[in-house]
Image (cartoon, helix red, strand yellow):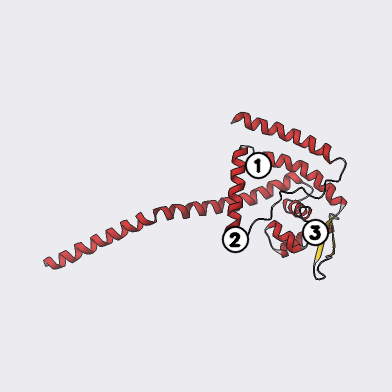
Amino acid sequence: MTLELIHDILFSTKQLLKIKEIYFMDYSNELKELFLMNQTYATLFTLTNKIQIEGDKYFGILTSRQYMTILSILHLPEEETTLNNIARKMGTSKQNINRLVANLEKNGYVDVIPSPHDKRAINVKVTDLGKKVMVTCSRTGINFMADVFHEFTKDELETLWSLLKKMYRFNGEEQDGFEEDANFMEYEEIDKIKSEALEEFAKRRNRVNKND
């Protein structure tokens, strides 16, 4: 073996080692970030399914998706409760909302009426029965929220909500949230129900805060 050949082999080996070192050095952070993204996505995916199943057990009368559909309707202006607007509020497709609304209408929880603004569209109106069911489910929903977030402090909840809203904007679209009061607060008994539910909720949260 000539000295020139030995030099070429050694040079090639060193270059390969250097390239390998540079690759892992330059992309170690990216590999870690990608790993965290994959794990976060998988956790969100499985968590969504888990929460939906557990929510079905809590609400009883309604499924989690039915509950959120009615809640979305109640958080929209009465003349703007089209299928498209409900779908946008829930972050899903019009086809999915169409199926959910059809089932809710069958059970007497909503009525489908022509849109006053668009003859091609329909509006979905929550019936009195639907509102009564929502009041009942909202009470159990408070217990559900307390159980799901029982390990979170108020500061952690604020951080989590902020991060989730940030993630929602990944495609440039802002979340159409649920911050405003829903349109079913005209029931006389609502204040009593809210007071009783919040009293129980406060007891649960106080136990959490004492353990921090």
User: Dot 1 lies on which element?
Assistant: helix
**Residue at 77% over, 44% down:** 138
**Mark 3: secondary structure:** helix
Which quadrant of the structure image shows residue 3? bottom left
Residue ID for mark 1: 148
* Residue shown at 73% from the left, 45% from the top: 57
Look at mark 3 in the image and give the residue it sits on.
103
Under mark 1, the amino acid is: Val
Coordinates of residue 59 in the picture (x, y in percent): 76, 46
Residue type of the residue flagged with mark 2: Gly
Rendered location of residue 68, percent (x, y): 73, 52
Q: Residues within 10 Å of mark 2 (few under 14, many from 20)?
A: few
Judge left or right: residue 54 versus residue 25: right
SS at badge 2: loop
Q: Which mark is residue 172?
A: 2
Q: Nearer the viewer, mark 2 or mark 1?
A: 2
Residue type pointed to by label 3: Asn
**How far apart are labels 1 and 3 at the CA level?**
27 Å
The answer to which of 124 and 103 lies nearer the viewer is 124
Q: Image quadrant for the C terminus?
A: top right
For marks 3 and 2, the one nearer the N-term is: 3
**Tag in front: 1 or 3:** 1
Query: Who is closer to the viewer here, 210 or 148?
Result: 210
